[in-house]
Image (cartoon, rainbow, N blue to C red):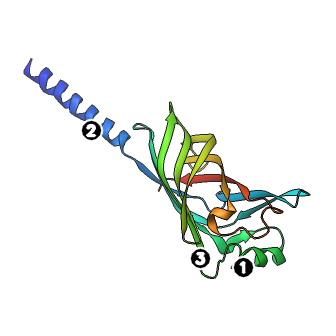
Amino acid sequence: MRSMSVALSSLGLALVVSTAALAAPTTFTPDPNHTFVRFSYNHLGFSTQASRFNTTTGTVVFDPVAKTAQIDMVIDMKSVDTGSELFNGHIQAADLLDTADFPTATFKSTSVKFDGDTPTTIEGMLTIKGISKPVTLKVTAFKHGMNMQKKDQIGADAVGTVKRSDYKADKYVPMVQDEVTVTIAIEARAP
C-alpha cells in the first residue's frame, strides 16, 4: 500500500511539474520576412495609397494557458516603402515622419483581450516622433501552432486607426486624409 501511495504522489508531482511547464509564457521573435506594418490613407480624394515599413523587430510574449500576451515592437521608420523612391524621401522629411531625428517608432501593449484561446483586441501605446498615444488594434486573424520547420509559431493580422495630426505629421491635412489605417501582419517564432 505504501508503494502505491508513493507512486501516486510521484505521478501527482510529475503532473504538477508538467502543467507548470506548459503554463510558462513563451517569447516569440518576429520573422523579418513575414512581419510588416502597413498603412493606408486617402490621397486628395483620388485614391487610397498603401505603403509599408520593411523592418520591424521586437518580441511577443504569449501564454496560451493563462491567455495572456505582451507585445513590444520597434518599427524602423527609415524602412518606409511607398513604392516610389522619390516619395520614400519625401515622407521621411521633418514635416512628416522626421526620420532624421526619430528613426524608430515603438508599440508597447498595455492589454490584450481574449475570446477563448484567441486574442481579439490589443491596446497599447504607439510612439511616433517622440509622441505617445493610445491605440487599439482589432485582431482579425490568429494562429498558434507548429510551422514547417516544426518550431512553435504564432501569426496574426491586426488593424487600427491613427491620426497623423496626433503625431505632428499632418502636412496637407485635410486634403490628404488625417486618419491612417494601420494593418499589421506578424509571424513570430519561439527559439
**Residue 36, how many percent across, how many down?**
67, 59
As helix, strand or loop, the secondary structure at mark 1 comes to loop
76 and 18: which is toward the camera:
76
Residue occupying the point 62% across, 43% down: 138
Q: Return the residue at label 1.
A: 93
As helix, strand or loop, the secondary structure at mark 2 comes to helix
**Residue 111, how many percent across, how many down?**
47, 46
**Residue 92, how many percent across, how many down?**
71, 76
As helix, strand or loop, the secondary structure at mark 3 comes to loop
Query: CA–CA distance between discs 1 and 2?
Result: 55 Å
Q: Return the residue at label 2.
A: 17
Q: Residues within 10 Å of mark 1 (few under 14, many from 20)?
A: some
Tag 1 or tag 3, which sits nearer the N-term?
Answer: 1
- Inspect the image, locate mark 3, and give the three-letter code of the amino acid beneath it: Phe
Residue occupying the point 74% across, 59% down: 178
Query: CA–CA distance between discs 3 and 1?
Result: 11 Å
Q: Is label 2 or label 3 in front? A: 3
Tag 3 or tag 2, which sits nearer the N-term?
Answer: 2
Residue occupying the point 64% across, 47% down: 158
Residue 111 visible? The answer is yes
84 and 7: which is toward the camera:
84
Spot the residue most to the front.
Answer: 174
118 and 7: which is toward the camera:
118
Q: Return the residue at label 3.
A: 102
Query: CA–CA distance between discs 2 and 3?
Result: 46 Å
Spot the residue most to the left.
Answer: 2
